[in-house]
Amino acid sequence: MLSGVKETRGDKVFLICNYIYVFLAFLIVFYPLVYIVSASISDPKYVGSGEMWLWPKGITFDGYKRVFQTTSIWTGYGNTIVYTVVGTAINLVVTLPAAYALSRRDFVGRTFFTGMFMVTMFFGGGLVPTYLLIKKLGMINTMWAIVIPSAASIWNIIVSRTFFQSSIPSELQEAAQIDGCTNMRLFIKIILPLSMPIIAVMALFYGVGHWNGYFSALIYLNDADKYPLQLVLRQILVLQEMSAQGGGAMSAATAEAMNNKAEIAALVRYAVIIVATIPIIVIYPFFQRYFVQGVMIGSVKG
Amino acid sequence: MEDAKAAVIGSPRLTLGKNRKGIWKKVIRNWELYIFIAPAFFYFLIFSYGPMYGIQIAFKNFIPTKGVTGSPWVGFDHFQRFFDSYYFWDLIWNTLSISLYELAVGFPIPIILALAFNEVRNGFFKKLAQTVTYAPHFISVVVMAGMIITFLSPSTGMIVHLIEGLGFNAPAFLTDPRWFKTMYVFSGVWQSAGWGTIIYLAALSGVDPGLHEAAIIDGASRFQRIRHINIPTIVPTMTILLILNMGSLLGVGFEKILLLQNPLNMESSDVISTFVYRSGLVDAQYSFSTAIGLFNSVINAALLIVVNQIVRRTSENSLW
């Protein structure tokens, strides 16, 4: 209400600089994203030479065609969906009840459990002992090696606990107990329906983690047909093992064919980035509120 | 008088006894809560504390057929070998310099960005800028590495074109060891600076508008109000994040480094955690690798505790 009353010249200059700064930050993040989309449907000739710099040039969908023809990408996609769904379900089953128990003031031993869980935030066994354990449990080269060792994150348990503490009135629990309601019924029938926001936040946090994870698959999986999408992407994007798969090739040969191959590989790389990221980019704007909420709940009290 | 004293002395014991009974009553009444916590309890016990038990192989010569417990003890041999190795100081230097570089660049940028977002009054522009700058947070580390490699690849990469368009000669980012750290740090800023603002914006939303109104009446400029109202508000958040960052100085984001590493940039890209991965899982030197990992996590935990102590002495914003 006081704004506009005393906008001095200095303030105006400052405000303009601020807008320019935010706009630059926006541009720096936005431009590479737009570039990838444009490059994925442009003629690789123009992309490679730098003639394509904003809008698509010489539109072609060959990159996507190649991606759709590559079976390893689809196997990876399927595996990732399975790992994400199963993994997230396990995460929720482990995280939510534990967080609820820890949120209850009348839960004897909650300091012990909180302390025991918190220690793992700052100290751990390390890579090799964990690997040996997973091996001993016979989980190597199975889906369980991907989903079980990441069954819960202490950070997410704390965020959920904070939510239960601050959003569920303790009178509700007391009243239910006076009416003879057991804790199990209370949790399933009353607490969970009231906790949809935190369930969404947790499902999203864990789900994105599974979707984007590659490292546990790299160390625990041997068979290529079990690889999740990110590991397949690693081969294509980072190790660049995708020369001209299924392209016949090796015929007339010469430098031009080689060049062509490299160009197609580059085109495929852009297309594959889009295909792999699209599920998250599509859901992100709708759920941004929840993601932000999750971070904010966590920041209230670490 | 005597009676009163006895009552005072006696009373704690009385309530203690009552409490103990009360505790058991609570435990029994809430037995289901222990079922609720059981999955998480066993998960942490097996998958976090289990590997901690396995740390003992750092002091042993691990022989797979004899298992963790049965392998012979060798004391500090593996540590000694690591400290004496020619790559020891290189690994420490690379790990520390990447971490500190990342901290110096990556820590202030989200703060400045959050303060700037907070001054934007145009709702649509603010929302757009926030949505877009948050988005890269969700790009996977593999795709991120792929983007870096593609954008920086010599003669065809977007950033290379950009630099050449400005009339400079683009360096060989991917293979020149001198560029590895910069590439790593700035791609990290690109990916996470926006997301990092959320926590500060949450703190800034708690500023009492009355403070700003009073400051405006007193003739404070926008900059002065940011300097004297907004920044002090977010100092506690900054302190906590700084402590947490110090606790992971030797734990740089190793997944991305592993993906960006190649034989040509190895001299500046090899950090403790990638070395642990290579020696442990690729070369199967289990005990040696565990020893290095232990060395790493002990230093991390020690740094966290020391920094937290220092902060606790000087302010009220410590972690515990």
Image (cartoon, coloured by chain):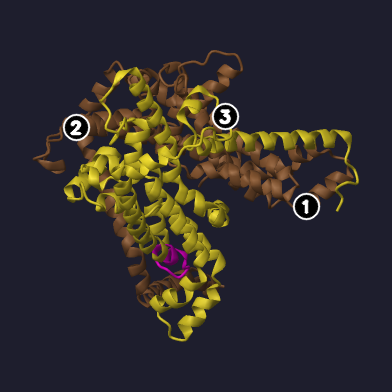
- Residue with the most extreme front position: A252
Label 3 marks a residue whose chain is A
Task: Report crowding for label 2: few under 14, some 14 to 19, many 20 or more residues within 10 A (C-alpha).
Answer: few
> The residue under label 2 is which amino acid type?
Ala
Q: Which chain is drawn using brown?
A: B
> The residue under label 1 is which amino acid type?
Pro
In x, y percent, where is residue A114? 41, 57
Q: Against A298, is A23 above or below?
A: above
* Label of residue B209 in the image: 1
* Label of residue B284 in the image: 2
**Would you say A300 lies left or right of A214 here?**
right
Residue A157, quarter of picture = bottom left
Task: Report crowding for label 1: few under 14, some 14 to 19, many 20 or more residues within 10 A (C-alpha).
Answer: few
Residue at x 43%, y 73% (from the top left corner):
A187
Task: Measure how far apart labels 2 and 1 are at the Cα level.
Answer: 60 Å
The mark nearer the N terminus, 2 or 1, is 1
Of helix, strand and loop, which one carries label 2?
loop
Residue at x 38%, y 50% (from the top left corner):
A210
Q: Against B136, is B123 above or below?
A: below
The residue segment tinted magenta is: A98-109
Decide if residue B198 is in sight here.
Answer: yes
Task: Report crowding for label 3: few under 14, some 14 to 19, many 20 or more residues within 10 A (C-alpha).
Answer: many
**Disc 1, disc 3: CB below 8 Å?**
no
Q: Colour of chain A?
A: yellow
